[in-house]
Amino acid sequence: MPGLLAAPSFAPIDVTKLNRPRAVTEEVVVGKDLLELLAGAMYADPLTIYREYIQNSADAIDLVRERGLSTDDPLGVVITLDRTLRSIFIRDNGASIPRREFVRRLTAIGASGKRGKGLRGFRGVGRLSGLGYCQELVFRGRADGDDAVTEVVWDGKRLRDLLRDATYVGDLASLVRGIVEVRVVPPGTYPARFFEVELRKVSRLRGDLLLNDESIRTYLSQVAPVPFHPTFQLGPQISAFLRARGVQEPVAVTFDGDLEPIHHRARDKIAFSEKLFDVVHSVEFLEFLGLDGEVAAFGWLLDHAYLGAVPRRLGLGGIRLRAGNIQVGGEAALGPLFAEPRFASWAIGDIHIASPQIIPNARRDEFEAGVHYAFLQDELTILTKRITQVIRDRSLARKRMRTAQFHLGMADQWLDHAHEGALPVAVSVHVRRIVDAHIKDVQHEIRKLSEAVPEVNALKSHVRNLTVRAARLFHDEEARQVGPRSAQDKAINVALRVILEHASSPQAGLAMSKRVLSAFEIS
């Protein structure tokens, strides 16, 4: 049509004459900056390096258990902090790495041989996590049958210098060769089998976090595969549940010189403040099926009063996700699945991933997206809705308990003051009605409380005692009471009722009532 742009015309294309795709034949360049990402930028929390190294130690210790290898000392990991030299040593007596493979495996990047073997670490990048926080990173070890100790030393200072050097043109392999040295050390006093990571001249950051044993202990109590504390009453029950589902035995992680290892964060008491505590009553075991009908995850949830968000300083709150008994993400991992994310930190528990289709991402702060993980999240959402309802129900129950206890306290006070001195009949009748009203309010709250609330029986018992006390104290007051016969009597009766019902305290109300009666010379 006139005034409109004509539609463009295209010449037909003969697809049979298009070039077929070909493989890339040009040189593929992997630059030096990749190592900087792996060594310093993958993890937001510096303490993550402890998780990465202990994760590898746990795999090595599991291999010793599976192969039935002999060991002189109990299997475990020992952490040594040398604040004078600013060094960290993390040593285990697991399977270690044979000398013939030591250099190749500890200079490889992203080429772990663990993938597909059910082990915790399988990407081959976590071991370099410490490189961004020290001047030298040393891997030292000796396997059964080796006559010497092998060391692979990564020079972190040299690495940073080369990364800043704009004129350096070497590829990743050349960079590694330029910053890594290999040494063979006489066995000396080293154990016959061990593996050790040493960080030399550790960076000082966030209040010297990496050399703060309390911060490390709290962190590892949450993320590492450590045992429950012997005093945690539900520990044996939960351990048996996990063991029956194939979770490997926990690993003893100890600071050099400590008598006890680090323990799992779970405990019997939750200290909200110096005066406010909650107590764990029991444990609920959980199981979640996946898309294929097989168990995708299982776990446990502690039952307590849900008084509020568990303080972060305790490192206790949240339902944590775990793969290989190593934590993935943090205490708010299930936060997005709660209608109110704040409730995520009110609960305490662990969910262990069992499905091989649900895999942690490289940073272990979340799982890789996929249909299996999405399906599990839908199942977990059902759990979070149930927890939310429990939180609301128990919050309402506490409110009803406070109301009931208030009325019980007021009834007790009125009866105590009535018992202390003989009351005029005109006063005692009103006091009896006030006490009865408080008892009635308590009974109203009791009817709304579930029988499952532990304090209900105590409330009922208290009400029975109050009823008996009131009956004994006022047993003949109704019979003695004579209705007001004059306008003055009626006015005094109304005044007494108003004074007593609106008094700030029983003591004040009774004192005012006696003054009113005294003024009219009524007794």
Image (cartoon, rainbow, N blue to C red):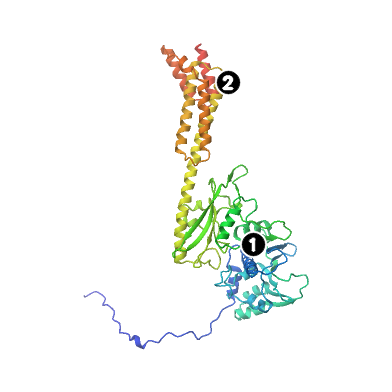
Q: Amino acid at mark 2?
A: Glu
Asked if residue 9 lies left or right of residue 500, the reply is: left
Q: Residue at x 47, y 39 (%)?
A: 449
Q: Which residue is mark 1?
A: 251
> Which SS class for mark 2?
helix
From the image, state whether disc 1 or disc 2 is nearer to you: 1
Closer to us: 418 or 120: 120
Whole-percent x, y for residue 511 in the image: 54, 20
Q: Residue at x 41, y 13 (%)?
A: 487
| Comes first in the chain, label 1 or label 2 | 1
Quadrant holding the N terminus: bottom left
Q: Amino acid at mark 1?
A: Val
Q: Which residue is mark 2?
A: 420
Answer with the quarter of the image where residue 135 lies.
Answer: bottom right
Closer to us: 67 or 10: 67
Closer to us: 437 or 68: 68
